[in-house]
Image (cartoon, rainbow, N blue to C red):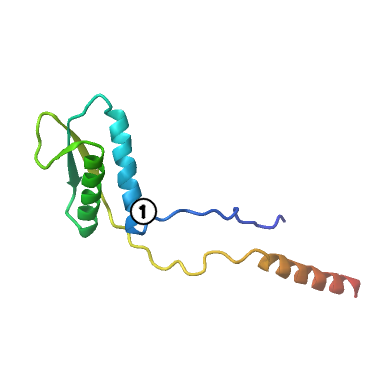
Amino acid sequence: MPLATTYELTYQQKMQAAAHWQVLARDIADQVALCSAPMTGAILIVSEGPPTAFSTALDDMLVTEFVTRGFAVRDVPSGDALELRYKTQIIRHGDPGFVRPPPGNFTALTAGVLAVREVVLEN
């Protein structure tokens, strides 16, 4: 019977600090500025869903990034404004605890099992 193995260890980046979200706001503004290169007008930023402390902070970061790029930021719809809509969602995670054993634990255990098997087979 084949021995079960796990997938190779991979990492997932987490956006958990305000600086991470500032990087996201900067990237969004860069992308919009590139896509709307001929447009030098205004932008309306609309957060969908109930307001939260997080969505308010992200809104402020987006406004800052767009103003830095020369956009006029509107707070009410107007015919000349590009409308950017986004929605945030808070996802709460519990402590995952011990996710994966350090490399080598199963190797050491396997060697011990093999050693015991050899002793049993010799007797």
Foreground of the two, 101 or 17: 17
- Taking the image as shown, residue 3 lies to the left or right of residue 99, namely right
The relative height of residue 75 versus residue 109 in the rendered view (above or below) is: above
Residue at x-position 24% and y-position 57% = 54
Hey, which quadrant is residue 26 in on the image?
A: top left
- Taking the image as shown, residue 5 lies to the left or right of residue 52, namely right
Hey, which quadrant is residue 66 in on the image?
A: top left
Residue at x-position 32% and y-position 57% = 18
Q: Position of residue 104 (x, y in %)?
A: 68, 65
Residue at x-position 26% and y-position 28% = 36
Hey, which quadrant is residue 108 in on the image?
A: bottom right
Label 1 element class: helix
Foreground of the two, 2 or 77: 77
The disc labelled 1 sits on which kind of residue? His
Question: Where does the N terminus fall, quadrant-wise?
Answer: bottom right
Q: Position of residue 20 (x, y in %)?
A: 36, 53
- Taking the image as shown, residue 24 lies to the left or right of residue 7, namely left
Question: Where does the C terminus fall, quadrant-wise?
Answer: bottom right
The relative height of residue 85 versus residue 15 in the rendered view (above or below) is: above
Q: Position of residue 29 (x, y in %)?
A: 29, 39
The relative height of residue 115 versus residue 34 in the rendered view (above or below) is: below
- Which residue is disc 1 drawn over? 20
